[in-house]
Image: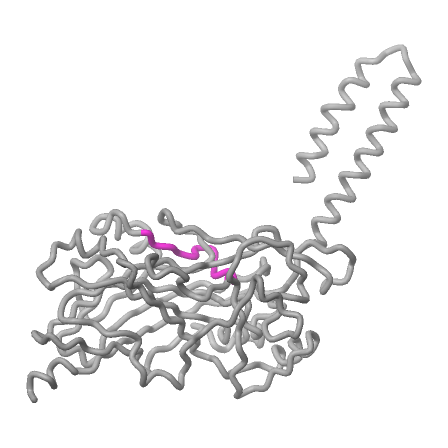
């Protein structure tokens, strides 16, 4: 950018001066004008280097990529899973190529999102409208602009992400899944996360405290969209709409785990973070700004409640509670994976990153079968 600006100034000012052959005063005046403009450009370029914070939402040196992403159903009792409502199995593996390229062959109007350059922190409280199956996902669209040199005295603006087309280079991952439940019963079964589900780094030996803080900030979201009978046309199943009945949950897998580095950083903002204790996250709920940086930290006394509100999550202690019910038939859902930028554990993160290995396992009860047996 700097070189382009310099070329523009050179082209506009130096070339005309070279055409002046007799008027020395005019040439000197032009040179002084060039020097002034060059000074302004250099100051502007230098300022750009200072405007970005290492606060989690705006980290530019995060390279946390998903290496493997597996989904399984256990003790299936007639439960299988699919990405396209056509090919069902008890285990499926997600990849960038499958989601972005291959899936279009069998599910042409899917709206999958992938983070090919790595997960970049965003913020969400799930869906705000029961008639929409897309999470409200917010991010910073302009970094952090400082009014003075102190990093904590900056301002941000938020923007809302759109999922109106397939995106390979998004900040988070999102895709549709379909649960096929064959019970032969009018009684719906309950669907759970299996405790064996896990999110870990592939190379645990190279993981530092900053990366562990990011792992503690991971969120998994699921939207239940709707269901159709087992013999419904796959095209109709793929295009199930909310019908004003969509619901969403957010799973926070490492809700009480806090690294010493996170604890120390949080204390700078007056936040008392205790390892082993749940600390609430206040996620973004609105786009706009400018918002003062000191008013964005979750749990701080000056939190701007116009732009941030409590994120309701389920945790490791809630896995015995069902995510939602699934009837006899095929149920459409949408899954989200992201780093929560408002999580206190991702505060001031600036890490080289590492590869994630994700295994999401689902299990259902057999309420329908028990009803038939009774």
Which of 180/44 is in front? 180
Please, is residue 2 above or below residue 265 in the view? above
Where, quadrant-wise, is the C terminus in this rendering?
Answer: bottom left
* 261 shown above or below 220: below
Position of residue 117 in the picture relative to residue 232 (left or right): right
Measuring from the top left, give residue 226's x and y in whole percent. 23, 63
Residue 136 position in % (x across, y down): 44, 59
Q: Is residue 63 left or right of residue 181?
A: right
Q: Residue at x 58, y 66 (%)?
A: 305
Magenta span:
111-122
Residue 248 appears in the picture as rendered: yes
Quarter holding residue 56: bottom right
Asked if the magenta segment contains residue 45, the reply would be no
**Is residue 350 among what the camera can see?**
no
Q: Residue at x 22, y 57 (%)?
A: 84
Q: Nearer the viewer, residue 362 or 19?
A: 362
In the image, what residue occupies the spot 63% across and 78% down?
261
């Amino acid at each position: 950018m700097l070189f382009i600006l310099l070329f523009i100034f050179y082209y506009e000012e130096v070339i005309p001066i070279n055409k002046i052959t007799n008027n020395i005063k005019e040439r000197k005046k032009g040179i002084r004008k060039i020097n002034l403009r060059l000074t302004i450009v250099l100051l502007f370029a230098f300022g750009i280097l200072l405007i970005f914070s290492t606060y989690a939402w705006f980290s530019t040196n995060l390279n946390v990529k998903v290496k493997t992403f597996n989904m399984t159903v256990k003790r299936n009792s007639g439960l299988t899973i699919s990405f396209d409502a056509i090919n069902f199995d008890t285990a499926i593996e997600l990849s960038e190529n499958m989601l972005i390229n291959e899936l279009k062959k069998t599910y042409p109007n899917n709206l999958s999102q992938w983070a090919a350059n790595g997960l970049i922190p965003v913020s969400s409280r799930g869906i705000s409208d029961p008639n929409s199956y897309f999470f409200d996902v917010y991010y910073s669209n302009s970094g952090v602009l400082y009014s003075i040199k102190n990093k904590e005295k900056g301002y941000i603006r938020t923007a809302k992400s759109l999922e109106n087309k397939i995106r390979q280079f998004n900040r988070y991952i999102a895709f549709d899944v379909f649960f096929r439940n064959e019970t032969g019963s009018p009684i719906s079964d309950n669907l759970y996360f299996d405790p064996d589900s896990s999110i870990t780094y592939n190379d645990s030996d190279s993981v530092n405290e900053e990366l562990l803080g990011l792992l503690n900030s991971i969120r998994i979201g699921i939207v239940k969209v709707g269901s159709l009978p087992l013999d419904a046309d796959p095209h109709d199943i793929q295009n199930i709409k909310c019908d004003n009945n969509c619901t969403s949950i957010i799973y926070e897998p490492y809700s009480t785990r806090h690294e010493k580095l996170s604890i120390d950083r949080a204390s700078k903002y007056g936040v008392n973070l205790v390892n082993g204790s749940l600390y609430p996250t206040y996620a973004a709920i609105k786009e706009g700004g400018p918002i003062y940086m000191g008013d964005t930290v979750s749990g701080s006394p000056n939190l701007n409640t116009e732009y941030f509100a409590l994120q309701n999550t389920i945790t490791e202690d809630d896995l015995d509670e069902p995510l939602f019910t699934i009837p006899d038939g095929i149920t459409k859902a949408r899954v989200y994976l992201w780093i929560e930028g408002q999580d206190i554990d991702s505060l001031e993160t600036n890490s080289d990153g590492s590869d994630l290995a994700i295994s999401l396992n689902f299990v259902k009860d057999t309420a329908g079968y028990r009803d038939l047996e009774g």
